[in-house]
Amino acid sequence: MSEVMKTDSNKIKALRLDKSWSQEQLSERSGLSLRTIQRIENGSNISAESLRLIAEALSADPSELILQKKLKPQTPVESIKKSFMEYANFSGKATRYEYWWFFLFMVLVLAIATIIHEQLNQIVAIIFLVPFLAVGSRRLNDIGRSVWWQLFLFVPFGQIVVLFMMAEKSEITSVALEE
């Protein structure tokens, strides 16, 4: 079984853009499929062989492309901001911390909007809908579940099932703890 690791997708993308290459051009130069390049730049895990091929194509040291274990802790404001900025990203991953801070922020804003005016609550709910579904999708990706589980949000008492899943530990965290 080949070793799977987490890469710094932002660094790979930056190196590719520094060379003014499209994802297709990186695909051709590395010998990997375009879909694999897209997955890597979206934060998916990568095999050691794929990492070597990308590093070779980008003329970089493979160890520089591996995501360091210790990341700077994210503040609640950064988590909320990231959730809004990645409102259209349904394919990456989101931590429990990121999801739950966004969830708390959304509940508080909706509560305040309800106190102010019912129509304001409806407008705010519509604004929050896509970012909430996106961060939920990323969270479900992080725990290795299908994003379709979010459909339970629209079923009576189905929210309990979804919220329970959102509280699960990340797949990567579980693997890292076993080592």
Image (cartoon, grey):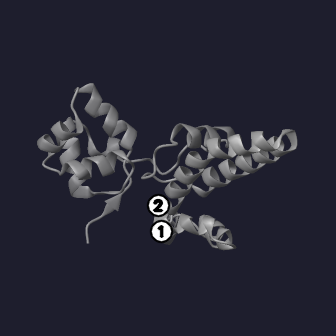
Q: Are marks 2 and 1 in contact (CB under 8 Å)?
A: yes
Q: Which residue is mark 2?
A: 141
Residue 27 falls left or right of residue 156: left
At a point 69% along the width and 73% down the height, the residue shown is 157
Residue 124 falls left or right of residue 15: right
Dot 2 amino acid type: Asn
Q: Position of residue 121 (x, y in %)?
A: 76, 44
Q: Position of residue 130 (x, y in %)?
A: 55, 47
The vertical placement of 66 against 85, above or below, is below
The vertical placement of 92 against 127, above or below, is below
Residues 48 and 92: in front is: 92
At a point 17% along the width and 51% down the height, the residue shown is 32
At a point 46% along the width and 69% down the height, the residue shown is 179
Residue furthest to the right: 115
- Secondary element under disc 2, as helix, strand or loop, is helix
Task: Quote the CA–CA distance across marks 2 and 1.
Answer: 6 Å
- Secondary element under disc 1, as helix, strand or loop, is loop
Where, quadrant-wise, is the N terminus in this rendering? bottom left
Residues 44 and 63: in front is: 44
Q: Position of residue 171 (x, y in %)?
A: 48, 66
Dot 1, how many residues are within 10 Å of its Cα: few (below 14), some (14-19), or many (20+)? some
At a point 63% along the width and 70% down the height, the residue shown is 155
Residue furthest to the front: 119
Dot 2, how many residues are within 10 Å of its Cα: few (below 14), some (14-19), or many (20+)? many
Q: How many marks?
A: 2
Residue 145 falls left or right of residue 78: left
Dot 1 amino acid type: Arg
Residue 172 showing in the rendered view:
no
Q: Which residue is mark 1?
A: 145
